[in-house]
Image (cartoon, helix red, strand yellow):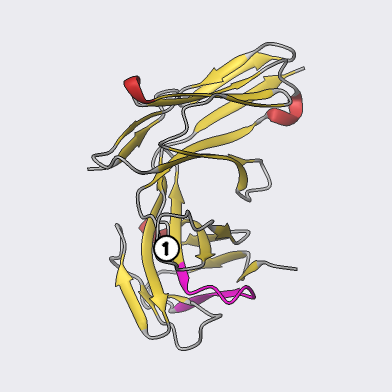
Amino acid sequence: EAQVTQNPRYLITVTGKKLTVTCSQNMNHEYMSWYRQDPGLGLRQIYYSMNVEVTDKGDVPEGYKVSRKEKRNFPLILESPSPNQTSLYFCASSPWTSGLDYNEQFFGPGTRLTVL
Amino acid sequence: AQKVTQAQTEISVVEKEDVTLDCVYETRDTTYYLFWYKQPPSGELVFLIRRNSFDEQNEISGRYSWNFQKSTSSFNFTITASQVVDSAVYFCALSEDLGQGGKLIFGQGTELSVKP
């Protein structure tokens, strides 16, 4: 089954304790990205990756790191989490093609993170 | 700059009422895509519809219908004869990132509550 998986689904942690949220897709997609969802703000893109070893900042990258060592995985790293990073996080993937065809985004199930 | 506005933060209706969720977007591109997603209480994002900027034909899918008007930059979503299961947060989104990864710009979301 084509899917994007995220782990963990729920996480409660404390300020400053490094954590990683994993994201994996089995569709051989080139493009992967992370969004965070906050009340009243919708979803905003944190980072994206166009392919292995190619990453770039989205709209709200402060406090986050990512890596793309393998095509299927795109972990989100919070090296020193703070309470303002309490949010619902979504990973997404899509193929990367030229032309004007739309590349459908596949979303993971979400990770609810609470930083105390 | 691209932007999506969902002015209705919360809507409450009684079952069987019709309800329209508003979405207004801003973009300088002539080619773009518009979307609606549903987020039920379980938290996942459920894709509802995609519409490209060249297709202003309204669409109906069961109790759901969408009205796309480029003249007013709006892409409104109507649920006819609402049901309790329609209770969710609904997001409108815009993508200009065609032929690439398809970054989505989301509106703030509208929380719909359908009471029995």
Furthest-bottom residue in this view? A69
The foreground one among A76 and A74 is: A74
Q: Which of the pair A26/A109 is nearer the observer?
A: A26
Q: Residue at x 54, y 56 (%)?
A: A104
Q: Quadrant of residue B16?
A: top right
Total numbered labels placed on residues in the image? 1
Instruction: Name the residue tied to disc 1.
Output: B101
Residue B104, position as x, y percentages in the image: 41, 50
Residue in the image at 39% along x and 73% along y: A49
The answer to which image quadrant residue A50 occupies is bottom left
Write the residue at 43% across / 27% down: B23
Q: Is residue B42 visible?
A: yes
Would residue A82 be seen by someone viewing this image from the given angle?
no
Horizontal side, residue B31 vs residue A109: left or right:
left
Look at the image and say whether residue B49 sits in the magenta stretch. Answer: no
Disc 1 crowd, CA 10 A, few/some/many (<14, 14-19, 20+): many
From which residue to which does the magenta span run? A19-32
Element marked by disc 1 = loop
